[in-house]
Structure formats: structure tokens, C-alpha cells
Amino acid sequence: MTVITSKQNPAVKELASLKEKKGRRERGTFLVEGDKMFLECAESGMEIVRIALLASKERIALSQSFLFQARLDENSVLFLGEDAFKAVSDEKTPQGILAEVKIPQAELVRPTKRCLLLDGVSDPSNVGAIIRTAAAAGYEELYLIDCADPYSPKSVRASMSGVFYCRLMRGSREEVLKTLEGVPILAADMDGESVFSFDAPETFCLAIGNEGNGLSEEVRRAARDVVAIPMDGRMESLNAAVSAGIMMYALAAQKIKKE
């Protein structure tokens, strides 16, 4: 067994590059860290390219189990010394396991049921938190326009495995809106009808805008309806991920009542 100790090792530098958007784009992969996230990634069927383990007695002893879960052979595991592992990890307190995972190539296709459009959501933690709630609430098809990278370490961490179970489709505003032609778009905006009384159609796309500027004019024009969360007049707005979560569940509840 070879233990890589240098941060300048080519494999270490490749993995470390995945913390940046440029590296993810060039390699077509992203990082998944921690025992729970690794296990859920493997169970979801995502394509794991290789595993990196901290070269501790505990991790070495579990390496065969990790390889079995990831459906990989012994050539696909790297054992890293502490400094090398820290160079790759994006966690403050690394757990000693991370995986390089293939980014799914999801083409733009029409939704099959209720879905979500993120229009310029720029905070990776918000993107991840919205994906997490979307997976839980049954919005498994997401369209992303000019958003933070959903496969960045912060977003993946905030998604709490939701990124493994949602179809994330990215494209230009024109491409996404063309794909959604004929699908009722519900624009989330403070001036809309209360989401709690709104009569949602069977299939729809809920559009969530940028944290500071809201929805783009193009998406506003394409929207069939505008929905809002009633708030105390002393409060101006809610966090984008919180707003999206409330609206997703409120609209899903309307559909359940109809059934």
C-alpha cells in the first residue's frame, strides 16, 4: 500500500482542483465528503470515479468495504497522508473519506410533474438548501439559470444528498424558457397572491429569483401567475431557501388536497 504524503502529487492536485468551478468543468467531476454523504452517493447510483482515504488504521481497515459500496476495484483508492488529505478536503474537520463523482449530464427536457426554476440564485448554500428541500418535497426536476454551481462543495454539503436524487438541468434563460413552453410558471414575488390559498395546477414550475434582485424580467413575463408568502409588515423578505421551501410545500399541499 502506497501512502501519498505530498500536496504536490498530481492526483492530490487533481482532487484539490475540484474545489474550484474551473477544475470541476475541466474534469467533469465533483467532490463528495464524509461517511454519510459517501454512503448515500453510492446508494443513489451516482458514478464514483475514485475514493481518497486518510491513511489511518481505521480508514485502511474499512477500505475494502468502501470500494465495494462504490463498485470500484483496488486501483481506484488513494491513501493520503494528513497534509495531503487536508489539501484536498473542503471540510473544517475532515472525516477522512471523500469521493470523486461524475457530474450527471442532464439535458434540458420538459418536466414530467411539478418542478422548480432557480433564476440567478447566487449563494451556493442557498442552492444546496433548495435542492435538499426539493428532493424532500417531490420537486425532482430543477432548471438552473445563472446560478451558483450546484456541484460546488458548499452546495453539495448544504444539499444533504439531495444533489444525488434531483435532475439538475442548466441552460441559458432563453433555452430554459423554451423548454418550459406550455408549462404554467408560478413566479415567487412579494406582490403575488397568497401561496396558501392559490389554486395550483396539476403540473407547474415554481420560479425562485436572485436573493437581492428577485426574478429576471424574462421569467416574470413568462410567468402565468405570481405567488407570495404573506408576512408581517415589519419584515421585508425571507431567505431565498426558506421562501422556496415554504412555497414548495404549500403548493404540494394544494395538490394533495385535490387528490
Image (cartoon, rainbow, N blue to C red):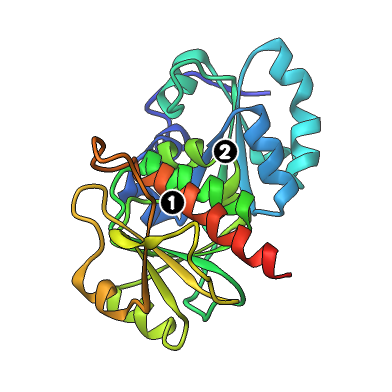
Eyeballing the image, is 116 above or below 98?
Answer: below
Which residue is more in the foreground, 113 or 35? 113
Residue at 74% x, 27% y is 63
In percent of the image, x 37 and y 56: which residue is there?
Answer: 25
Q: Secondary structure at mark 1?
A: helix
Is residue 91 positioned above or below 193 on the image?
above
Foreground mark, 2 or 1, reads 1
Residue that carries the numbered disc 1 in the rendered image: 244
Q: Amino acid at mark 2?
A: Met
Displayed quadrant of residue 195? bottom left
Please tell me which residue lies in front, 253 or 1.
Answer: 253
Give the amino acid at mark 1.
Ala
Label 2 vs label 1: CA separation? 16 Å
Q: Quadrant of the N terminus?
A: top right
Residue 214 lies, in percent from the top left, at 24, 57
**Is residue 80 found left or right of 72 in the rendered image?**
left
* Residue at mark 2: 160
Disc on res. 8: none
Answer left or right for 19 relative to 257.
left
**Vertical comparison of 41 with 209: above or below:** above
Q: Where's residue 235, x and y in %?
A: 26, 37
Q: Secondary structure at mark 2?
A: loop
